[in-house]
Structure formats: C-alpha cells, structure tokens
Image (cartoon, grey):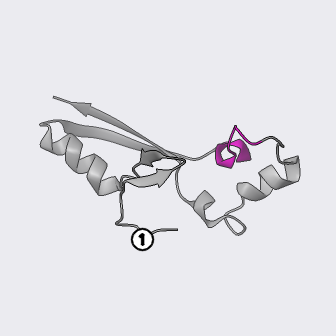
Amino acid sequence: MKPYDSVGPIVIDEVPRYTWRMQDIVNAVVSSGLSIKQMHEMFAQDGTNWVDEEEETLPSQQELDNLCNWKMNPMAALPQWLSICATK
C-alpha cells in the first residue's frame, strides 16, 4: 500500500511503475489543448483482472469471485479502466 498521492516510480521486480491519479490524466489532456467530450469508467468483468498471469497456480472460481467482491477486495469498488474521448 502507498499514499494515494504517491504516483511513483514504484519499483516492482526491478521495473519502475507509475500509478497516475485521475487529476494527472485529465490535467494532461486539458493542458494539451484538448477538450474532453466524454469520460467512461469501466469495471473488471471477472476476477482475472486481479491475477498475475505469471503465477504458477491459478485461483479457483470462488477466489476469482471474491476478488470482484468489494467487501473482500476494497480495490474492486474502483474502476479499473478509464476511457476519455477528447477533441482538438
């Protein structure tokens, strides 16, 4: 876990990663001279979004279902993807 405003870099397995905030993404779009026309937040359809594909053993269906349950996995309450339609 990390503070929300700590965007990175966070090094995982020697790879620097960034976790951008919504304001970082929207401000970059707007400061580029684009006008946001529509935004859409999308949620994971199943628990595989939360599973590392490099793991040797795959989780059971119940474990996948639990990963989508925001009461068991609070991160599941947040959208996993953001789509922005903008024009110049």
**Which residue in the protein does label 1 denote?**
3
* Residue drawn at 30 percent across, 47 percent down: 25
Residue depicted at 36% across the width and 64% down the height: 6
Q: Amino acid at mark 1?
A: Pro
Q: Residues within 10 Å of mark 1 (few under 14, many from 20)?
A: few
Image coordinates of residue 29 in percent, x first then y, are 22, 41
Left or right, residue 27 beside residue 67 = left
Residue, x 46% and y 68% (percent of image)? 2
Instruction: Name the quadrant containing residue 70.
Output: bottom right
Decide which of 53, 4 is in the foreground and name it.
Answer: 53
- So how many labels did they put on this image? 1
Q: Quadrant of the C terminus?
A: top left
Residue 8 percent coordinates (x, y): 36, 56
Q: Magenta includes 64?
A: no
Q: Quadrant of residue 10?
A: bottom left
Q: Main secondary structure of the magenta part?
A: loop
- The structure residue drawn at horizontal position 65% and vertical position 44%, both measured from the top left corner, is 49
Foreground of the two, 33 or 36: 33
Q: Is residue 14 left or right of residue 39?
A: right
In the picture, residue 33 is in which quadrant?
A: top left
Q: Hey, which residue is sitting farthest front in the picture?
A: 14
- Judge from the rendering whether residue 52 lies leftward or rightward of residue 75; answer left or right: right
Percent from the top left, x then y, of residue 53?
A: 69, 38
Q: In x, y percent, where is residue 67?
A: 72, 56
Q: Which residues are magenta?
A: 45-55
Q: Secondary structure at mark 1?
A: loop
Q: Judge by depth and name the residue closer to the eye, 7 or 49.
A: 7
